[in-house]
Structure formats: structure tokens, C-alpha cells
Image (cartoon, coloured by chain):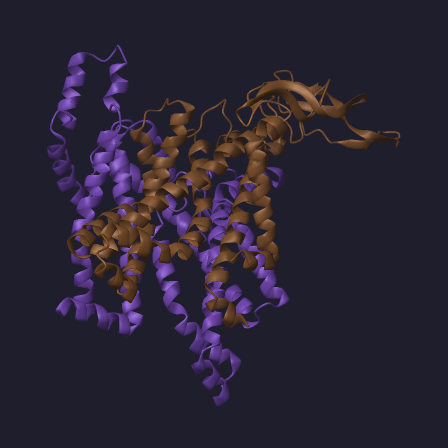
Chain colours: A purple, B brown
Amino acid sequence: MILYILKRLYQLIPLLIGITFFSFLIIQLAPGDYLDQLRMNPQISEKTLNQMVKIYGLDQPILVQYFKWLINALKFDFGYSFSYQMPVLELIKDRIINTLFLSITSGIIAWLLAIPLGIIAALRPNSLIDKFIQIFSFTFMSLPGFFFAFLMLFFAVKTGIFPTGGAYSPNYENMTFFEKILDRLWHVSLPALVIGIGSLAGLVRLVRSTMIEQLQSEYVLFARAKGLSEKDIILKHALRNALNPFITILGFEIASLLSGSALIEIIINWPGMGMLMLDAVLSQDLYLVMGGLYIGSIMLILGNLIADILLAKLDPRIRQREVEGVLK
Amino acid sequence: MIEAISKNRFAFLSLNILFVLYFLAVFADFIAPYPYDIQHRDTPYHPPTQIHFFDEKGNFHLRPFVYGYKMVDPINKYYKVDYSKKYPIYFFTEGESHYLLGIFKTDKHLFGVKEGKIFLLGADNLGRDIFSRILYGARISLSIGLIGVFLSFTIGTIIGGISGYFGGKVDNLIMRLSEILMSFPSFYLMLALRAVFPINLSSTEVFFMIVVILSFISWAGLARVVRGMVLSIREQEYVLAAKSYGASSLRIIVKHIIPNTYSYLLIAATLSIPGYILGESALSLLGLGIQEPYASWGNMLSSAMSYTAVSSYPWILAPGVAIFITILAFNILGDALRDALDPKLRRLIK
């Protein structure tokens, strides 16, 4: 097992270098830089500009700039945001907490509903309830997230049940601890529902098809012949065997924790990474874009890694194959 | 395959809906009563005009008509029906001149009113007809899916084919590259790539920029799948036969290996068109894609970003419905194709 994890980690090194270099290239390709905006400002003298160029190292060759950035990035020091005038890490930290809170809440909504609904649908394929679940999942799979967000906003404004935008109320500071929790949950509910229902739609289909496949297999027939209760068959046998694809998907979910909801965040006005990245790109805030891309990619890689490790842990066949690959 | 689609009621319906949508897009300037950029400054946020056959007294009119609307609250743009004004709808009526299919100059439109206004789906903040703009926007939103899929699938299959066929170092390099590309969160990558291009591009340039960005993001996943398929196909005996006849590598890849991946590619293409439509909409929605006055479904929705506008004038959400219907149709069609070509799951359910 340790051998397996080490092998995976080793594979990540070139990947990380590639990712960072590539994102650096993208930013360098962009026309102009952040200082262009300052140059337009007659109040800033040529001298200050030159000084800034020096400080940010913009006069050095790309490769030198890149390596400087990379060495710092390994220590999670992403430099300074031009437009916000504060360290990128500070900026990102705040936003990451909001984004993680939103994605995890929506993830919980999706998984808690998807597994029971998927099993119910799989137990009686083509029954009325199965058809209903299928229509539901198909509709929401095709409903663009941003459009659903608009619809929910419309609903929120009309009914006043949900707040429209922000992560907490203006008088948040004066609340008691318990009220603070409630206020947070109240504010996260709308975007979390939008994202949660969106991913629920896809998940239900997956749970359903995997469960159908498992329930048709011979070991289930055997368990039935043995006289096991239907509950035991489903929970102890079929569901356990159906876990593998779910874990891969769970990995994807971890991977997209930071970036999966970016567009919805922007629309619902949720102060998360999505808004920050949009601002950064619009104002050509070099180090902020880099930092965002870097953290987003690390999350993605980590998500896949966790999924792989979990898979290997649950399924000895995979573990065996990979380790043999190493020893060869 | 066609048989399978016509057997599946929903898939057949979806196919027809898509035909209708593409038809509407091609003949947009004829079917739309107004050009996409005509502003009716005196009627911002005009509500949808209902088509009537019966007037307020219950009398039947063979020629349908719309009532006039009067603005009663200029600040909140609130309108009331003015029953004293009736505007009959004429078919093949004269309007703004346009080039049908880009060739025939004509001023005929499918329908329209001679006086007054007809806004089937209401008007936007500048008093432009949303129905007409949806039709024009369909040209962009629907074609971006097709062109984007064509581009990325061409790149993806060729690169995946090369990678799988040659193996070794080439394969290793290509796979590492695609891994890097796939490790980026796609929405962030899309934003960052958008920043590479200048903000003020002409509309054609923006269109191709979007296609290039979206294809660049999505070829990698496809290349990996194709590579996997090629790995197993290249061991087949007919490939060996082709080799012994002296066929070149390129010929074997293009003529013998890639055709075997067609059925998968067809399914994948149908199912990935929605991604392109969504990508374009997202960029345009954020003001980074197709720019005003040109219409795309995405940039039409950007006015819906303000929830006060949405709650007072919900008809500005209409382009979203168009996106939804298109994506639903593509998804149902892709699903039916998969069921037809990959019968494993269907057998299990029976």
C-alpha cells in the first residue's frame, strides 16, 4: 500500500511542474501586464513604475521569473496581488473557506439524496417511481447550472425565503454563536441547493445503473437462494460491490471542490474563488491568476489521488496490479 | 442506428426539435420579425404580446392580432394592455430588408404587424425583440457546438491515434501533456485562456476565439480514450495485414484504426456538444464572449444577472429556456445512441 502511494506521489512531480509552467506561459502570452493600467495614470511617475518593475521582477527573463515564482509557490507563497494590494495567499485563504463550505454542503445534499434515490430506482427498473426519478435526473442534467441559479434567484426574490447574495448577513458580527451558524446555513442554502441538485441528477443515474448491474449478478442470486433478507442483500452485498465507481466520482467531487461551482458563485454573488478568479483575469492580476490556477490544480490532482488510494484500499485487485507494475 | 432512434420516441422527438432549431437558426432573418439590433427605445422591457383570435368582447377574428400596450409606469417600466388598439398580424409582410441565406435580398418576413409592435417573448432593456434575438443567437450558440466538436474531435482522434499506435516515447509525451491539460480546473483554464486574447476583438474573431479555447480544453480527454481504443485495435489481425501490404502508418491510423472508433466518437460528440454551448454561454454571460449588439444566448442572459430585473421582467430568462431545450435534446439523443450502440445496460434491465 505504501509502495503504491509513493509511486503515485512520484508521478505527481512532473505533473506539477508542467502545470505551473503552462499557467505561467498562458499569463505571459496575455497582452500587456498589470502595470499597463498604472502607466495610464499620469499621477504615477516613471520612477515609481520602474521601481515596481524591479520589485515584481518583471524585467527579468520569463524563465527566471518562473523559477522564482515556483520556489516560492512550493512554500505556498504566491506573491503579491497587484490589484488588491495584499498577499495572494491571504486573499485566496478567505475565499477558499467560503468556496469549500459551499461545495461541501452541496456535496452532502447530493450524496445523501442520490444513494437512496438511486437504490429505489434500481430496485424496480421501469416502475413509476423509477421513471419519475429518471425524468428528474434527465431534466436537471440538462438544465444549465447558471440558468437554474437564475430561476432560484427569481424564486428567492419573489418569496423572500432565501437571501440573495453574500455569505452572511450585515449584522453577522453581533450574533451569538448559534445564530452565526444558522445565518451561515441560511445564506449557503440557495447556492448549495442549485449546485447540489445539479450534481444529484448525474449521481442518481450512476447509482441506479451500477446497482442494476450488481443486482443482476450471480452472487445476489445466490444470496437470495440462501434466504438472506432483501435489506441485507442490498446493503451488504450489492451496494458494497457498487462502491467502486462511486469512489471514482467522489474523487472527482473532491477535485472540483474549489472550481466546480465557480460560475454559480459569480451569479449568486457568493464571495468565493470563482469571483476572485474572474476579477483577477479581468484586471490581469498575474500572481493572483497563477495562485488560483495552482491551488485549483492541486485540489484536482489531490482529489484524483485520494480516489485512487481509496480504490486501491477497497479493491485488492487494483492494489496488486499497480504494485506489480512498480516492481517490474 | 437510425432505426434505433426512430424506435425511441423521445430520441426521435429530440432529433426533430434539433432539426427545427437549426432550421430556425438558418432562416433567422426571415422568421424573426425584427433584426437583432433594432432598438425600440420607447418600449424598454415591453412584456410579451399575446396573440389573440378573440377580442375583449368575445368576437372571433380569422386574422390573429395583438393588442397595443401603454406604459403606465415609466420608472418601473410597467405596461398595461390597451384594448382600444388592435394590430392584426400579417404573414409574408414587409419589414427590414435582409439577405436570405446570405444571397437573396428580400424585405419579406414570415410574420409581423404593420403598426404597433409584436414582441412574442417581450423586449429587453433597450426595447429589442427577445424572440428575434433568440433566433439570431441560435446561429452562434448552435454552430459553436458543431464547429467546436468537429475541431476538438479531429485534434483528439488524430493525437490519440498517433499516441496509441506508436506507443513508447511519443505516447508518453502526449499522455503527460494531456494529463497536464486535464489537471486544470476547466472553468479557470477557460478564464485564463480568455485573458490571452485582447478584450476588444471583432465579433468573428471572438467566435473563433471561443471555439479555439473550448476545443483546446477538451481535446485531451478524448485523445486519452481514443488512445486506449487504438491500443486494443492495433493488435487486431487486419492491422497486421495492412502493415504487411506496406501501408503507411498514417494510412493505417486514418483508414483502419480510426473508423473503428466511429461509433464511440458519434456518441461522445453528441454528448459533448452541450458542453460547448454551455461554455460559450458562460463566457458571453460574463461579458467575455460574444459582445453586444450581437446576440448569443449567453450574452442575452447577462441582463438577468441583476435579480431586480429578473423579478420584474422574468421574460428576459427566455434564452435560458432555449439553452435548456437544446441541451436536453442533445442529451436524450446521445443517450439513445449509446443505448443503441452499447446494448449492455439495456439487456440488463430486461
The one nearer the camera, A90 or A179, is A90
How many labels were placed on the picture?
0
The one nearer the camera, A132 or B233, is B233
The one nearer the camera, B291 or B135, is B135
Outermost top residue = A42
The one nearer the camera, A105 or A229, is A229
**Residue A37 locus on image (x, y percent):** 28, 19
| B247 vs B308: above or below | below
| A19 vs A251: above or below | above
**Residue A1 locus on image (x, y percent):** 20, 69
**Residue A136 locus on image (x, y percent):** 57, 56
Any part of residue A10 in sight:
yes
Q: Residue at x 37, y 23 (%)?
A: B201
Any part of residue A269 in sight:
no
| A65 vs A151: above or below | above
A123 relative position to A206: left or right: right
Is the C terminus of chain A in the top left, top right, bottom left or bottom right quadrant? bottom left
A67 relative position to A201: left or right: left
Q: Residue at x 36, y 46 (%)?
A: B153
Outermost front residue = B245
A315 relative position to B92: left or right: left
Quadrant in the picture for residue A9? bottom left
Quadrant in the picture for residue B115? top right
